[in-house]
Image (cartoon, grey):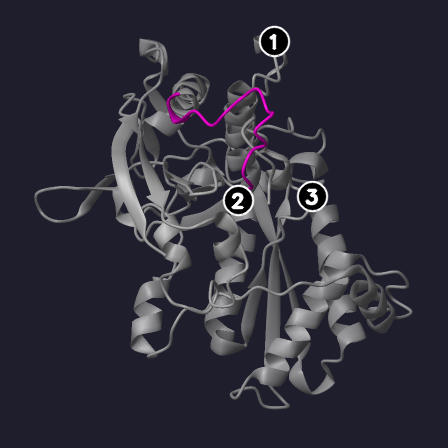
Amino acid sequence: MEVKVISRELVKPSSPTPSHLKNYTFSYVDQIVPISPPLQTPAIIFYTAISQTQEQPLDITWLKTCLSQTLTRFYPLAGRIKQSTIDCNDEGIPVFETRVNCPLSTVLNSPVLFKHEGLLQKLFPPSESLCIINKQQEISELAHICIQINVFTCGGVAIAWYDIHKLTDGISALTFFKHWASLASRSSDENKLIQPDFGAGITAFPPSATAQPLLIVNEEDQVKQHHCSVVVKSFIFRDAALSKLKLKAASHQVLHPSRFLAVSGFIWEQALLASKTCQKDDKTVFTLNINVRPRMKPPLPEFSIGNLITHAVASAQVKVATLPELVANIHTQVCQKKEEIEEYEGEKGVKAIRENAEKFLKSCSDNQDKAYKITSWCNVGFSDLDFGFGREA
């Protein structure tokens, strides 16, 4: 597979940001996210080739026009990140356009797509395009997001991106892409478009002049230090297998585990079985993200922008780590955390967010290779994004 870059440009907002909005101060939960090392989140969505009878062909220029209009609404994303603020200077975001020398089906059906190091990576923009390097060869500023639009010989498309986990969590990124996709597909009028709320998170978690970024280990350095490699794999759980798995995962504590609980427990169980370092008396931890927006009282707006998540941390002894027990542990911790979130308010919420983040990092550090983390994008909405030029593969 050859991926040829045919254009690279900075897409800027279609209208300049007003002067009174030029400086954006992060909420406390965003302040404590470090920018060094930057936490880069990759994602990719595949779209099959459009039908010849469809009225709207693929138009990259139109996509970029709609992205420019979207950045006007999401003006901080077109700026440059400092540690505690954003310079909303309308510098724009890097966008790459490529041509791939094969049909999309060849890539998706390839048995080596998730095995061959660097193959999938070709469809992503260079992650370093997010970083603005100063004369001292240090990261002085960061762009929020970089995007690559890959067009295959069959007309299929893959939109891939990196974003910085500084202002945008998964829901924030989805809000941005939903707005862009709605404009591109011409499916909504201006009054019905999803609109971001940049103020709710700041009101709920006020910024602090004394906020210190969390100390997060650079994963790339860890990989080099331990002479290991990053592995990407794809597994498919079909309905029949999921039904059986849910039965196996059930217990008197969790009579009817959800698909997410059953699969999470199963992955945790299999990781422990495969581990060459876990001893029977060892402790193992398993963490997952929880969206705080709908669980606060009163709830935050659905499309509030920010890292409005916290962590539930489940633990177990390896020697008693059966599937039902692992699922029950995850379930218990998630329920406790959801109840705790209801009490988040003002300084109490700020303190809880900090303590939860530090607990999560300490658990990972203390347990090293016996710590696991899962993030679910099921039912979040990325698979429903419709840009108007094809169907999500």
Contact flag, marks 2 and 1 (Cβ < 8 Å): no
Is label 2 or label 1 in front? Answer: 2
Neighbours of disc 3 within 10 Å: few (<14), some (14-19), many (20+): few
Left or right of 222? Residue 365 is right
Q: Amino acid at mark 2?
A: Phe
Which x, y percent locates residue 243? 85, 64
Residue identified by numbered label 3: 379
**Which residues are the magenta region?**
48-61
Q: CA distance from mark 3 to mark 1?
A: 25 Å
Q: CA distance from mark 2 to mark 1?
A: 29 Å
Above or below, 37 against 277 in this view is above
Q: Quadrant of the N terminus?
A: bottom left
Above or below, 16 against 239 in this view is above
For the residue pair 93 and 341, the one nearer the viewer reads as 93
Q: CA distance from mark 3 to mark 2?
A: 17 Å
Q: Amino acid at mark 1?
A: Asn
Q: Quadrant of the C terminus?
A: top right
Residue identified by numbered label 2: 46
State whether residue 173 appears in this view: yes
Left or right of 52? Residue 4 is left
Q: Residue at left 62%, top 41%?
A: 383
Which x, y percent locates residue 334? 72, 55
Q: Which mark is residue 165?
A: none
Q: Amino acid at mark 3?
A: Asn
Mark 3 or mark 2, earlier in chain: 2
Q: Secondary structure at mark 3?
A: loop
For the residue pair 131 and 129, the one nearer the viewer reads as 129
Q: Which mark is residue 191?
A: 1
Furthest residue toward front: 52
Residue 16 magenta-highlighted: no
